[in-house]
Image (cartoon, helix red, strand yellow):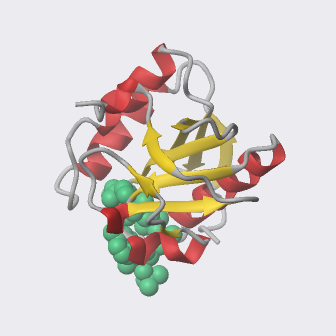
Amino acid sequence: MPDPGVTLREEVPGDATAIRSLVTEAFRGAAHASGTEAQIVDGLRAAGALSLSLVAEGDAGILGHVAASPVGIGDAPGWFGIGPLAVRPDRQSRGIGAALMQAALARLRAVGARGAVLVGEPAYYARFGFAPDLGLTVRGIPADYVLALPFAEPARGEVRHHPAFGLEG
Ligand SMILES: CC(C)(COP(=O)(O)OP(=O)(O)OC[C@H]1O[C@@H](n2cnc3c(N)ncnc32)[C@H](O)[C@@H]1OP(=O)(O)O)[C@@H](O)C(=O)NCCC(=O)NCCS
């Protein structure tokens, strides 16, 4: 669990600037970062596609953030993409990322989601139950980094993210 004093909450109007700064800072220099992660969050919000936007807040303001948005996989309903997930560099490795991910998964399950996908490092996301799924593809992404966590039956096919991700090529 994160440090005492760190709380999780949904984003509220007025958080967008702090979230943008945090996401930019977290991904600066991160392996596989595109540098567009903050724009993705802004784009999802502007399009009304930010299904979930959770912040971790502590003594120094917003310390972490996770986003989720609907994805299309064939005609399977109720699948969501999780990400970006970002924690302020000076507060990493204290459980904030894990707390955000667990809260995001709990909220998605609570609204009847059928599963979650993400593009990320298997070594980190395995702890939440995500695993590479050879039945799923994301255009331009190596199979090892396409991770899925079905809440019921698996889905099969190409994962179509919101255009804000810039993955459609
Ligand atoms: C990835 C990230 C969100 C994790 O948040 P966090 O609060 O630091 O994570 P937690 O405290 O829950 O977990 C820390 C553990 O995850 C591990 N970890 C972090 N990033 C990892 C990665 N890319 N690959 C493998 N393990 C990773 C840490 O080594 C640490 O391991 P330990 O528990 O054995 O010490 C955060 O490091 C971050 O914002 N990174 C930069 C942006 C990024 O890469 N986001 C993910 C995109 S896929």
- Asked whether, in this view, residue 8 is left or right of residue 67, the answer is right
Which quadrant holds residue 112?
top right
Residue at 72%, 59% in the rendered image: 153
Residue at 59%, 55% in the rendered image: 100
137 vs 70, nearest the viewer: 137
Asked whether residue 63 is in view, the answer is no
150 vs 10, nearest the viewer: 150
Image quadrant containing the N terminus? bottom right
- Asked whether, in this view, residue 99 is left or right of residue 151, the answer is left
Image quadrant containing the C terminus? top left
Work out which residue is located at the far left of the displayed protein and give it. 29
Up the image or down, 131 lies above or below 39; here it is: below
- Asked whether, in this view, residue 158 is left or right of residue 71, the answer is left
Residue at 52%, 40% in the rendered image: 67
Picture coordinates of residue 19 (x, y %)?
Answer: 44, 34
Up the image or down, 77 lies above or below 148; here it is: above
Asked whether residue 95 is in view, the answer is yes
Picture coordinates of residue 121 (x, y %)?
Answer: 36, 68
Residue at 20%, 40% in the rendered image: 35
Up the image or down, 81 lies above or below 95; here it is: above
